[in-house]
Amino acid sequence: MKTIAIVARKGGTGKTTLAVNLGVAAFLNKKQVALIDLDPQGSLSSWGDSREDESPAVVSAQASRLTHILEAAEKNNADISIIDTAANAESTALAAIRCADLILIPTRPAIFDLRAIQDTADLVKMAHKSAFVVLNAVPPQGNLGDEAQTGISEQDIEVCPWRLTQRIAFVHAVTAGLSVQEYEPTGKAALEIKNLYRWVLKQLK
Ligand SMILES: Nc1ncnc2c1ncn2[C@@H]1O[C@H](COP(=O)(O)OP(=O)(O)OP(=O)(O)O)[C@@H](O)[C@H]1O
Ligand SMILES: [Mg+2]
């Protein structure tokens, strides 16, 4: 089983959005998926509750039980587990980072979000791991995405080559208990997630 941790010290950067959409992408790719919600806000669990489909499985957990939950997922033949974490919860993020084969740090391309990346990157370094920043909610027009990418690279942090654009489909899909691939299979958001998922799979090999 491979484990992906989604962490960001800043709130609202797209952690849960990424967990939901990558989780369903893996599920549509015939993988057994466990989505683990470490955020007491429970956004990922609420998404799971509002979903008609029972898969992917969503488990709400405390960081202290993470190892146990991951062992249980593996015993249940999970191929991929994806951990969604809370903002501003250093010990929870660290627990997820320690268990992860791949660490993703979603960020919006805004100056305050970019400054906050360094804090998350420091946490990753404390665990002697490496991570990729995923630019999220990039405006479809203008060059904010490119500017952000250059800024992050200068901080010596790796950036995922695929970005997610600011699209209303991401909001509507989560509200409906779906992923963008289920909500609008031929839409641009779905294509972005497909590309991101394919890249994720390569990193996990
Ligand atoms: N690419 C996107 N396009 C449009 N809206 C987005 C996008 N990504 C996220 N959002 C919206 O931004 C808000 C915050 O996203 P999300 O809940 O995924 O962030 P988060 O990092 O999990 O937040 P928190 O720190 O509160 O857990 C949500 O309303 C979500 O629908
Ligand atoms: Mg969240």
Image: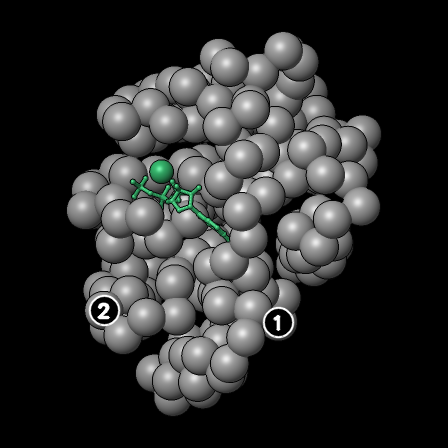
**Is any part of residue 126 visible from this angle?**
no
- Residue 145 is situated, as x and y percent measured from the top left of the image, at 49, 76
Q: Nearer the viewer, mark 1 or mark 2?
A: 2
Q: Mark 2 points at which residue?
A: 112
Q: Which amino acid does label 1 sit on?
A: Pro
The answer to whether residue 193 is left or right of residue 64 is right
135 up-or-down from 38: above or below: below
Q: Camera-side residue: 18 or 6?
A: 18
Residue 148 tag number? none
- Residue 142 is situated, as x and y percent measured from the top left of the image, at 51, 81
Q: Distance between the residues labelled 1 and 2?
A: 21 Å
- Name the residue: 62% across, 66% down: 162
| Displayed-image quarter of ligand 1 | top left
Q: Camera-side residue: 84 or 68?
A: 84
| Mark 2 residue element | helix
Sort mark 1 into few (<14), some (14-19) or many (20+) by Cα contacts within 10 Å: few
The answer to whether residue 204 is left or right of residue 157 is right
- Name the residue: 68% across, 33% down: 183
- Residue 110 is situated, as x and y percent measured from the top left of the image, at 32, 70
| Mark 1 residue element | loop
Q: Which amino acid does label 2 sit on?
A: Phe
Residue 161 tag number? 1
The quarter in which the C terminus is drawn is bottom right
- Name the residue: 63% across, 11% down: 52
